Image (tube, rainbow, N blue to C red):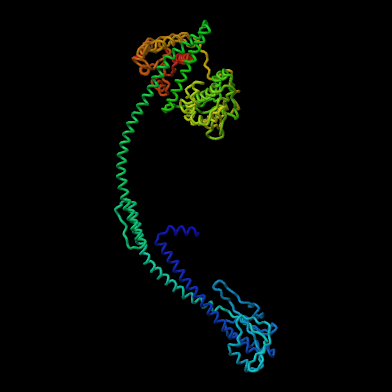
Amino acid sequence: MVSMLRNKLRNASITNKLNVLTAVSVSAALSLCWLSFLINHAHTMLAAKQRQIQSLAKVIAYNSVAALEFDDRVAATETLASLQEQPTVCCATLFWRDGRPFAFFDRHGDKQGGARHASPQHDTRWLPIPRTIEIDYPIVGHQGIAELSQDLFSDEGSIPWGRDDRQPQRTNDDVGGSHAYHIGRLVIHASTNDIYEQLAVHTLWTIPILAISLCIGLSTARGIQRLITEPVRDLARTAQRIATEDELSMRAVKYGDDEIGQLCDSFNEMIDRLNEGREALRRANQELERRVEERTSELADALDRAMAASRAKSDFLANMSHEIRTPMTAVLGYAELLGEDDQLSPANRERIDVILRNGRHLLTIINDILDVSKIEAGKMTVEILECSVCEIIADVCSLMRPRALQKGLNLEVQYPTAIPKIIRTDPTRLRQILVNLLTNAIKFTKQGAVTLTVAARNSTAENAELELQVEDTGIGLTAEQQHRIFQAFTQADETMTRRFGGTGLGLTISKGLTELLGGTIEVHSEAGKGSKFTVRIPIGSLQGVEMIRSCRELLGTNSPGSVQTVTPNNVSGRILLVEDGVDNQKLLSFLLRRAGADVTIAENGKVGMEKALEAWRMGTPFDLIFMDMQMPVMDGYTATSELRRAGYTLPIVALTAHAMSHDRAACLKAGCDDFVTKPVDRKRLLQTAAEWMAKAREQMEPVGAPLA
């Protein structure tokens, strides 16, 4: 309650606050004056009342001496009955000197006499004044009546109110030669109701006076308040108009030199400074706008140059990819064909293995550089799919275990927790991360083991994580090396490139791919004691997903991802090979013909389009077209688009050396059904040919009228 009133008063206007302050102050002052007057008047009337009853007690005591001397109770009762004329006297009692009651008077006829008025009764509801007062007056007997009479009307012989002289004592007062002694005492109880009645009357008269005084005080204070509130209101209105209308030309009116006048001066000075600041800000904004325009123009030029450089870089990478991958197809392809010759001498077979090994290593370097370029350019994309974590792990292990065994290392897989059978992620990127980490671990480990730990974290949450740890017993890393290990073209130290080889891009690519998947990668290592790389990637909710203890029971004898051997029988059919490179023409046509296909060669897109349409019109269409996308005269994009526009519906597979995802998307957008990346892998080539030729045979119907 108090807090609510305090809050209301805090939010009230200054006028209301001053009104409350004035009302409280005036009311408090008047109330204190009235209360002090009331208390003083009450004590004055109480003292007068006590003196009155004490005088009455003297008279009754004097008249009761004879009755006590002669033990005349009737006379004593009649004497006390005279108190009936005193309306404030409640009761009176005569006592012997030994304390025994002798006679009593009670206005209400109570036979117990003063028993119920044995002590003064207090009522604290009004004032600290007793409801009844008690006068205890001693009765003194004298041998000389004249002296007693003289003492009766003298104040010198009075006994003070409140004195309790219970035991009668004999005195030897020398009063006219007589002796005085106590023969009893008189106790009178009188009511103070008349005092309270008089105080009530005074209060009734005082309340209107207080109200009139309060009104006069408030009226006077209200006039004084205007001297304070009017300047404050005017200042508030001025500030409000400045705030709402943003008109800094207005000034507060000064009414005097008091504190409010000083406030007005300070307010006006503040407005002047705001004007100066606004003008300075306007000039600064103009200067800033000019500079921003200059900087914007410079940044636009720089952005154009950067975009041009980025496009040039992308074009350069695309061209370099094409120029390198295209001859690599012939190099690796012919090396593989030579390796199949059973008549080769061991020395020649070793030389061919060197060509294959270094060619594939060169291809790996090219792929790493392209991946880093795509990550830095923001062109690397991920595709979140439902996939089997066990198939990914088995595929990676089947690839990496021979490398580990070649160095005498054990490649172990551990499952500390149950793992989901199906997860949601990009399987290609996850496989690439694992291959990079395991390759790195095997490369820098001379002896011991490389351990892959697979675990599910937060499996009960909506966003579970797959934790992959690759731990080795290799050379380890120092703290300084750990800080820069994920930088591009960086290894632990410069000598490692000479000792172990590699470009230092594997961990950079792994970090970039992990972040694209929404995960994190970290390393814990100690020099000479091995390293542990931990990858955590989100895999979505696992509610309703089957959990397994390990992948061993799910894996069959065939490793996942393996390509079935393609026989010449399942590649039979007519194939149009559109390729401008003579070496690649010979290699690819040889591989396809050896698998059972009838191959027709076209040296550019224009010739290929014409041959495809002519065969279609003749009713002997090609079952499949392999279309190189970068050729002279007419490239593969244009040729494919023209074929689709002419109504050609049979499969077209792109042969592209461009590894960028947007290049592959461009192939599909042009109308290609699939693509094979150069350098062409023989198994991939034959598998793709077999799949699309089977679909073509299902799709093909007897050709009717020739195409227009």
**Residue 17 on image: x %, y %:** 42, 62
- Residue 75: tell me if it is visible: no
Near-viewer residue (231 or 320) = 320
Q: Is residue 205 above or below residue 403?
A: below
Q: Residue furthest top?
A: 343
Near-viewer residue (554 or 366) = 366
Q: Is residue 188 above or below residue 251?
A: below
Quadrant location of residue 58? Answer: bottom right
Q: Is residue 166 above or below residue 530?
A: below
In the figure, is residue 282 to the left or right of 589?
left
- Residue 486: tell me if it is visible: yes
Near-viewer residue (304 or 689) = 304
**Residue 339 on image: x %, y %:** 50, 9
**Residue 262 on image: x %, y %:** 35, 60
**Residue 497 on image: x %, y %:** 49, 22
Near-viewer residue (456 or 494) = 494
Quadrant location of residue 221? Answer: bottom left
In the figure, is residue 320 to the left or right of 55?
left
Q: Residue at the location (53% across, 19% down)? A: 561
In the figure, is residue 556 to the left or right of 375?
right
Q: Is residue 190 above or below residue 369?
A: below
Q: Residue at the location (42% across, 66% down)? A: 22
Which quadrant is home to the C terminus?
top left
Total marks shown come to 0
Q: Residue at the location (49% across, 11% down)? A: 570
